[in-house]
Image (cartoon, grey):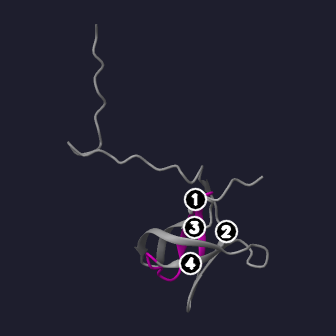
Amino acid sequence: MTREKSRPSSEPDGLLRAPRRHAGGARREASERVLLRADGFETHGWTLNVSRGGVRAIVEDALTQGVEYQIVVGDEEQVQPRRASVVWLQDESDGQIVGLKYLDGDDGSIPPKDG
């Protein structure tokens, strides 16, 4: 009986990578205008990818974790705003890259699939 050699890990010894969450459904790359609003605040940006559960976007002005935003992806005239909160953020020299989770689903996080 031959034992298979284990593959070398790129992780340091003793550290395990956390499993990725896929609760928001499949992500797809996107490049649509995004508008975010909160009380006394408004900023614009572009989506990087979207899923049923949320959006990853780059925005011009800094968002704040813990604040609820109204988000519009696409044409503001044709799309209803959705409630979203910042899950993570990464400051960049020209803005922020942010992960936003929709808050208007049946369970508070994931809206039902279209159609």
Q: CA distance from mark 2 to mark 3?
A: 20 Å
Helix, strand or loop at mark 1: loop
Q: CA distance from mark 4 to mark 1?
A: 18 Å
Q: Are marks 3 and 4 in contact (CB under 8 Å)?
A: no
Residue at position x 78%, y 52% in the image: 115
Q: Which residue is disc 2 drawn over?
A: 32
Question: Residue 93, located in which quarter of the rendered image?
Answer: bottom left
Q: Camera-side residue: 79 or 13?
A: 79
Whether residue 38 is in magenta: the answer is no
Q: Earlier in the sequence, mark 2 or mark 1?
A: 2
Q: Which residue is disc 3 drawn over?
A: 103
Q: How many marks?
A: 4
Residue at position x 28%, y 7% in the image: 1
Amino acid marked by disc 2: Glu
Report the span colored magenta.
45-66
Q: CA distance from mark 3 to mark 4?
A: 10 Å
Q: Earlier in the sequence, mark 2 or mark 4?
A: 2
Helix, strand or loop at mark 3: loop
Q: Earlier in the sequence, mark 4 or mark 1?
A: 4
Q: Which mark is residue 107?
A: 1
Q: Are marks 2 and 3 in contact (CB under 8 Å)?
A: no
Amino acid marked by disc 1: Asp
Whether residue 57 is in magenta: the answer is yes
Give the x, y percent position of residue 22: 52, 49
Mark 2 neighbour density, 10 Å: few (under 14) some (14–19) many (20 or more) = some
Q: Give the number of the mark in front: 1 or 3.
A: 1
Amino acid marked by disc 4: Tyr
Q: CA distance from mark 2 to mark 1?
A: 26 Å
Q: Which mark is residue 69?
A: 4
Q: Give the number of the mark in front: 2 or 4.
A: 4
